[in-house]
Image (cartoon, grey):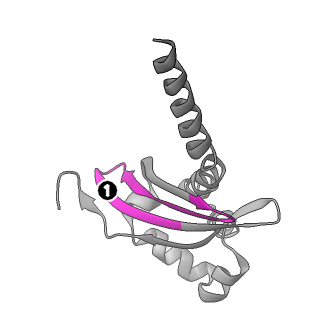
Amino acid sequence: MRKTLIILVLLGGASWWYWGRTLEPVRVIRAQLAAIDKENYAQAYDYLTPGAKEQLTVNAFEALVRANSAVEKNFGSTFLSRRVEGNVATISGTLEGFNGQVSEVHYILVKEGDRWMIQSFTWSTPRTTGER
């Protein structure tokens, strides 16, 4: 009994350590989504790395947001695939829009100094829940 309890505690601690390392990158993504929800595209754009900004203007970023209903007005997000290796976080999941549309998303974030920033992202074309 005691041995089983120790194993469960160790597994729980390892899981928390693994999941806990991904909390800050996910907070950055959710902060960007909150800015998008408020239509504050300049603030949402500021979560991108300087390199990402070289590849995408703020106007092009806004156009990408407006082209994806699940991103533009998202109702919820789920990020079940999370990985941190050194200063790089890879986060994937889904966004659900208020209109019932779902978009699969993938983010790569890098830690620059003490701040996580979005290096790249992809948002799939929205689909209706249950559609493949």
User: The residue tagged with tag 1: helix, strand or loop?
Assistant: strand
Residue 73 horizontal side relative to residue 36, left or right: left
Q: Nearer the viewer, residue 92 or 103?
A: 92
Residues packed near mark 1 inside 10 Å, few (<14), some (14 to 19) or many (20 plus): many
In the image, residue 97 above or below residue 45: above
State left or right for residue 11 relative to residue 131: right
**Up-down: is 58 above or below 115?**
below
In the orientation shown, which residue stands out farthest toward the bottom?
A: 55
Front residue of 47/18: it is 18
Residue range (magenta): 84-107
At a point 37% along the width and 52% down the height, the residue shown is: 97
Give the residue at the far left of this rendering. Answer: 131
| Residue 83 in magenta stretch | no
Q: What kind of secondary structure does the magenta stretch mostly adopt?
A: strand
**Residue 115, percent from left and from top:** 77, 60
The residue most toward the top is: 1
Residue occupying image coordinates x 30% and y 64%:
126
Q: Which residue is mark 1?
A: 102
Q: Residue at x 17, y 62 (%)?
A: 132
Q: Position of residue 42 (x, y in %)?
A: 68, 69
Vertical relation: 12 (above or below) 38 = above
Q: Quadrant of the N terminus?
A: top left
Query: Measured from the top left, where is residue 105 in percent x and y?
Result: 42, 63
Residue 92 on the magenta segment: yes
Task: Determine the image quadrant of residue 14.
Answer: top right
Lateral position of residue 49 relative to residue 76, left or right? right
